[in-house]
Amino acid sequence: MSIWRGLVWSLVLALAVPVVAGAQGFKWWQSDKFKADLALAPDQTTRLEEVYQGLRPKLTAGKEELDRLETGLSKLIAEGVAPEGDVMKMVDQVEHSRAELAKTRTLMIYRMHQILTVDQRAKMNALHERWEQERRQTRRQPTQ
């Protein structure tokens, strides 16, 4: 698989499994359409759910921490009185939290990727390309 295909596939999963505290997000592996289009076996669906549920607490906690830090940084900047060094320290904390969240999400995507067959990954890429094309066409339509 080419690097670009892998990145596209990763983007599909990243968008399909949003990290929102308290929300399930779109579990594409439980969708009848995705199950049919990808020919997912019942054990694959179960294993994909296990990967998601296994990392969900860490993703949720990471998202909550990132939100908390971003709120603190926004307040610090809005007040405009903190020394620049304090602001940069907070920026470092926010970006570290964001990187940790991204690493956990990438690990989840990698584990899900391993569950799918080569053919299923190719079909997932095609589904993503179709979705991207539809999204671009929707953006180009003038607002009435």
Image (spheres, rainbow, N blue to C red):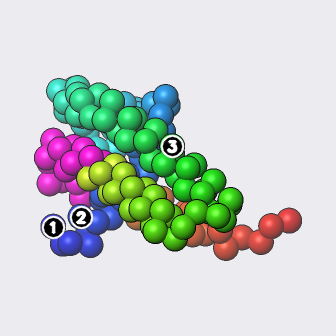
Q: Write the residue at 80% across / 67% down.
A: 143
**Marker disc for residue 6:** 2
Identify residue for label 1.
1
Residue placed most toward the observer, 37 or 74: 74
Q: Indicate the position of residue 108 as horizontal and vertical percent values.
A: 24, 44
Is 107 a magenta residue?
yes
Q: Which quarter of the figure is the N terminus placed in?
A: bottom left
71 is higher (above) or lower (below) than 25: below
What amino acid is found at the position of numbered circle 2 in the picture? Gly
What amino acid is found at the position of numbered circle 3 in the picture? Arg
Asked whether the viewer can see residue 100, the reply is: yes
Asked whether the viewer can see residue 28, the reply is: no
Q: Which range of residues does the magenta coloring cover?
A: 104-124
Q: Which quarter of the figure is the C terminus placed in?
A: bottom right
Relative side of 43 to 38, left or right: left
Q: Are marks 1 and 2 in contact (CB under 8 Å)?
A: yes
Q: Nearer the viewer, mark 2 or mark 3?
A: 3
**Marker disc for residue 68:** 3
Is 113 a magenta residue?
yes
What amino acid is found at the position of numbered circle 1 in the picture? Met
SS at circle 1:
loop
Q: Nearer the viewer, mark 3 or mark 1?
A: 3
Q: Are marks 3 and 1 in contact (CB under 8 Å)?
A: no
